[in-house]
Amino acid sequence: MKNLIFTSFFLFSIGFCVHSQNNGQLWLETGLKTKITRDLAINAELNNRIGNNGLSTSFTQLSVKYKVFKWLSASLDYRIISKKQENTNYLNSNRINANLGLSHKQNRFYGNFRLRYQYAYGRIFNSNYEPDFDNAIRFRPRIKYDIENSIFTPHLSTEFYYNPTHGPLGKRFNKIRTAVGVDFEIDGPHEFGLQFIYDKKINLPDPTNYLILKLSYAYKIAFYKKNKR
């Protein structure tokens, strides 16, 4: 099973590079994760997305997540976004994400399905509809495998974006985001991750697709600790 996971990860990564004729980006994510109670977590993160002309988008996000049941969680995110314009100025907008997560674990496999409604407001930069910066409903199935006696946890996901608004580009799916990556499980409060992402827009005029390398780091602070008996 371990060899199958690594082979799939390798082939998927090579396929990204060979078949992609798209713009490239580097995403850098740093975060702080806190556990307030057994079921309540509060997180903060800073994301920078770098393209051919330097920093293209930067955003700060605050999140509150609550585990309702073992298999069900709900979370709310607030995001302030700074996006680079053609005149090189940066303009801001805001976004709220309402998320519902369903999860299931079978042996060393872990499956998750996330439903997200994103609401954008205060957007002052002028452009066509963009799935990442406008209202959208998103569906993301994800699977990961915990390799025994290894620090590597590979994962694979596909996310579908749907525009719920009225208008010429509304009421349709408009983007598919596919990601393959690995989390590094190490001792201590540090978390590291690496992902290859392919952002493909569909049903939109003059789409720009992206091949993305994402590097992430988070520092964990545990205000809540399990009682040991």
Image: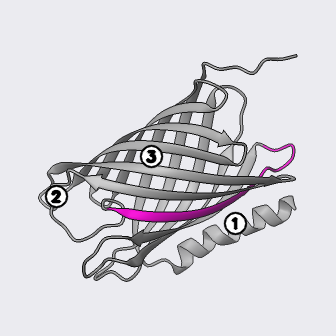
At numbered mark 2, what does the secondary structure look like: helix, strand or loop? loop
Magenta region, residue range: 135-150
User: Which residue is disc 2 drawn over?
Assistant: 125
Which quadrant is the C terminus positioned in?
top right
The amino acid marked with disc number 3 is Leu
Residue sitting at 62 percent across and 31 percent down?
190
Residue 179: percent from left, percent from top: 57, 63
Magenta-span inclusion, residue 153: no
For the residues labelled 1 and 2, say whether their Cβ atoms are less than 8 Å apart. no
- Nearer the observer, disc 3 or disc 1? 3
In primary-sequence order, the first of circles 3 and 1 is 1
In this figure, which residue is indicated by the disc labeled 3?
28
Kind of element beneath mark 1: helix
Circle 2 residues within 10 Å: few <14, some 14–19, many ≥20 = some
Q: Is residue 50 above or below residue 4?
A: above
Q: How far apart are marks 3 and 1 (CA)?
A: 22 Å
Q: Mark 1 points at which residue?
A: 10
Instruction: Please name the predominant secondary structure of the magenta segment in the image.
Output: strand
Real-space Cα distance between discs 1 and 2?
39 Å
Rendering quarter of residue 220:
top right
